[in-house]
Image (cartoon, rainbow, N blue to C red):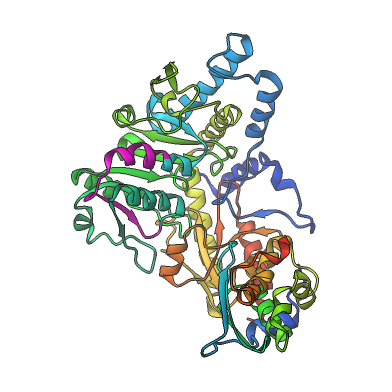
Amino acid sequence: MDDFYRDYILDHYRSPRNFGHIEDPDAVAEDLNPLCGDQIRMELVVNDGVVNDIRFSGKGCAISQASASMLTESVKGMKLEDVAKLSKDVVLENVGIGISPTRLKCAMLGLRVLKSAAIGEIAGWPDEE
Amino acid sequence: MLTASANESKLELIRQDFPILRQPTSGGKRLVYLDSAATSQKPQAVIDSLVTYYSEYNANIHRGVYEIAARATEAFEAARATVAQFINADSREVIWTRNTTESLNLVAYSWGLTNLKPGDAILTTELEHHSNLVPWQLLAEKTGAELRFIPIDDRGLLVLDDLDRLLDGVKLVAIAHVSNTLGTILPIETIIPKAHAAGAIVVVDGAQGAPHLPVDVKTLDADFYAFSAHKMLGPTGIGVLYGKRALLEAMPPFLAGGDMIHKVEYSKASFNELPWKFEAGTSNIADAIAFGVAIEYLNGVGFDWIREHEQQLTAYALERLRDLEGRGLAVYGPKDPKLVSGVLSFNYADIHAHDLASILDTEGVCVRAGHHCTMPLMNKMGWTATARASFYIYNTEADVDALVAGLDKAAHIFGV
C-alpha cells in the first residue's frame, strides 16, 4: 500500500476528469460504499446505444474518486451493452496493483454505479462476480 | 496520583500483559493500536481464562449434576456477581446478552412494545450510535410513538436549553454515556432525574462509558444500562443489560426457549425468575467467565488511574495535533480532556479519512475511518467521514508520536 498513492491517482483525485452533471441524462445511477463515506453518481448520454458523454460526481476517498474518474475516460465511445458487461479488470488495470482487500470496494464503487446506470437497476459488486 | 516515573513503570507493566502489543505488523512496524473504541486488546489473564475453561472445566451450566458442570456454573454466576458489584447492582439485575446492541434491543422489544402507545414519545440525542437509534426508530414505528432528539452544538455538546419541553410526553429516554465518535461525556447525571420527573425511564448506552468511567447504577439511578465486554478487555460475544428489578420483573421475556422457563407444557410455559428469565438457550459461558476476569483486571488497575492516564494522553495528543492545524488538521469535539473520554475524531486537509487510515496502516498505526456507525451525526456536522484515534489503558505518548509521524507521511504523499 506504501507506493499505491502514485502520482496519477493523486492527479485524478485532485483534478477529476468528467466531473459534474449532464442536463437531461439518458441513464443515471448512484450508490455509496458500505465501508463508509464514499458516494458516486454516474450520468450518461446515450445515442444509438453508444455512450457519447459521461459525467460523475460524488465525494470520498482518493481511491474511489480517482478510480471513477479513470473509468469515465475508459468508457466514452463504448457501446452501452459492453459497459454493462465490464468486469473488475478494467478497474484493476486503471488503478494499478497494490489495493488492499479492504479498499477494493472503494475502487469498485464507480464501476458498480456505472453498470447500474447501464442496466437500469443496481448491479452487483464487480469484485464479487 | 503517581509520579511521572511511577506512572511510566505502571504503564510498562500493563503493556507487558498484552501479548498482541509485542507482535510487529507484517511490514515490521510496532503495532500502535489506537482503535480501542472499536474493540479493546486483551490481557493474558483473559486469554488464559478462556483456555483454562475449555481445557479444564467446560460443561453446560445450571442443569449438570457432575463436578465440572458445577464448577462451570459456579464460575459463570461468580462472573455475574463480579459485574453486579462493578456497577453496584444486584446479581438478579444483571442480564447476560451478546453485546450492547442486543441489550438495547431487549429493552425495545420487552419494555418498549408493552409500554408505549400512540401519543407517547421517545427521546434520544443527535449523536447516538446506530445501535441506540435504530431500535428506537423501529419501536416508534411499531407503537405509534414519536421519536425526538436532543440537539448538539458544533462542539458536539448537548444543547439542553429546551430539555423540559422536549421531555413532555416522553416515556423513554435513550442516551449514550460517552459518544463513540466525538468522545463527549454526556451529562446523564443531569438528564436522568429530569427524565424521571417527566415520567420517563432512561436507557443508557454504556458501550463507551463502562470501559473508561466508574459506573454506579444506583447513584446514576439509570433504569437500564447496557455495555459490552469486548470494549473493556473482555472477549467479543458477551455483554450486559442492567435493569432495575421492578422493571425487569414486570417485563415479558425477550427470547424464548430453554433456561428461561420454569415449567413447560405443550400449550404453554411459565417463566424463570430473574435474571434467567431473559437468558434463553445456552449462554456464552466461557466468555462470561472471561469478562469477570477482565473486570477484575480493570479493578486492579483502578479507574482513577485509568481516567487520569486517558486525560493526560488526550491532552498530549491535542497538543501535538495542534501543531498540524496550520496545514489543515481539524480535530472535532470539545477538545477538552475533561469533557471527553479517550476518543479523538479528526480530518487532515483534503485527505479522505480512508486514505489517511491506509497510510497510517503502513506505519503500523491503527485508527478507524468512516462514519463510526453514526451516519446522522456525520451528515449533521457535514463530514463525509472522519478518522478516529481512541486510547485505552495500554496506550502511550510514543503511540501518539507514531500517529503524528504517520500524519506527516500522509501530508507528504498528498502534497499538503
Q: How many marks?
A: 0
Is residue A49 found inside the magenta-colored segment of the image? no
Place of residue B229 in the rendered image (x, y in percent of width and height, measured from the top left): 53, 38
Place of residue B93 in the rendered image (x, y in percent of width and height, measured from the top left): 38, 28
Rendered residue at 40%/69% (across/down): B380
Rendered residue at 44%/69% (across/down): B379
- Residue B349: in sight, yes or no? no
Q: Quadrant of residue B359?
A: bottom right
- Residue B250: in sight, yes or no? yes
Which is more toward the observer, A73 or B415?
A73
Which is more toward the observer, A63 or B159?
A63
Residue B408 vs B4, above or below: the answer is below
Residue B83 vs A57, above or below: the answer is above
Q: Quadrant of residue B125?
A: bottom left
Residue B213 vs B280, above or below: the answer is below
Residue B28 vs residue B299: left or right?
A: right
Rendered residue at 65%/64% (across/down): A124
Place of residue B159 in the rendered image (x, y in percent of width and height, measured from the top left): 29, 62
Which is more toward the observer, A76 or B85?
A76
Place of residue B278 in the rendered image (x, y in percent of width and height, measured from the top left): 43, 29
Is residue B126 found inside the magenta-colored segment of the image? yes
Rendered residue at 54%/78% (across/down): B328
Residue B3 vs residue B134: left or right?
A: right
Q: Quadrant of the C terminus of chain B?
A: bottom right
Highlighted range, magenta: B106-127
